[in-house]
Image: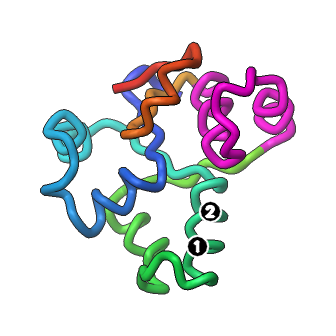
Amino acid sequence: MTVDAYLLDSHVLLGALYESAKLPERYRTVLAGSAQTFISAATVWEVEIKKKNGALPVPDKIWEQCAQTGHQFLPIDTAHARAAAMLPLHHRDPFDRMLIAQARLERLTILTVDRDFAKYDVSLA
């Protein structure tokens, strides 16, 4: 991965797709630029669970929209799973813990509004 690459959490992803005006200006600048942006398989899983439960009304074409916007998908591999399991329990959300592990291993900067991410040694925008 390159230095100028970002991993979007679900909140930032949904904001970027459907309510960009609500995102912090620094995130809108990154998303409008030429930097690589990634969506974790964990985010796909989280959104699909919330969508199925009726907690998140997003269109079925959300993942096609992500690809059309230029986001790349980041699979979860064994190293990511092991790293997520080894993280201190500052954050108990397993999806967010996976993002933190992936960002650390892949040298990605996370775009998130979740302040608990700052408790970890991870690059945040």
**Residue 120, how many percent across, how many down?**
58, 18
Q: Foreground residue, 68 or 6?
A: 6
Q: Which residues are magenta?
A: 77-106
| The quarter of the displayed image where residue 90 is located | top right
* Quadrant of the drawing holding the C terminus: top left
Question: The disc labelled 2 sits on which kind of residue?
Answer: Glu
Contact? badges 1 and 2 (CB < 8 Å): yes
Residue ID at (59%, 50%): 40
In this rendering, position of residue 28 left or right of residue 10: left
SS assignment at label 2: helix
Q: Work out whether 42 lies above or below 108.
A: below
| The quarter of the displayed image where residue 103 is located | top right
User: Badge 2 is on which residue?
Assistant: 46
Question: The disc labelled 1 sits on which kind of residue?
Answer: Lys
102 within the magenta span: yes
| The quarter of the displayed image where residue 71 is located | bottom left
Q: Label 1 crowding class (10 Å Cα cut-off): few <14, some 14-19, many 20+?
A: few
Q: Which mark is residue 50?
A: 1
Residue ID at (79%, 27%): 83
Residue ID at (54%, 19%): 119
**Residue 107, how many percent across, how many down?**
55, 22
Residue ID at (61%, 22%): 104
Q: Work out whether 103 lies above or below 42.
A: above
Q: Work out whether 87 lies above or below 121.
A: below
In this rendering, position of residue 52 left or right of residue 85: left
- Give the main secondary structure of the magenta stretch: helix
16 within the magenta span: no
Q: Which mark is residue 30?
A: none
| Farthest residue, direction top | 121
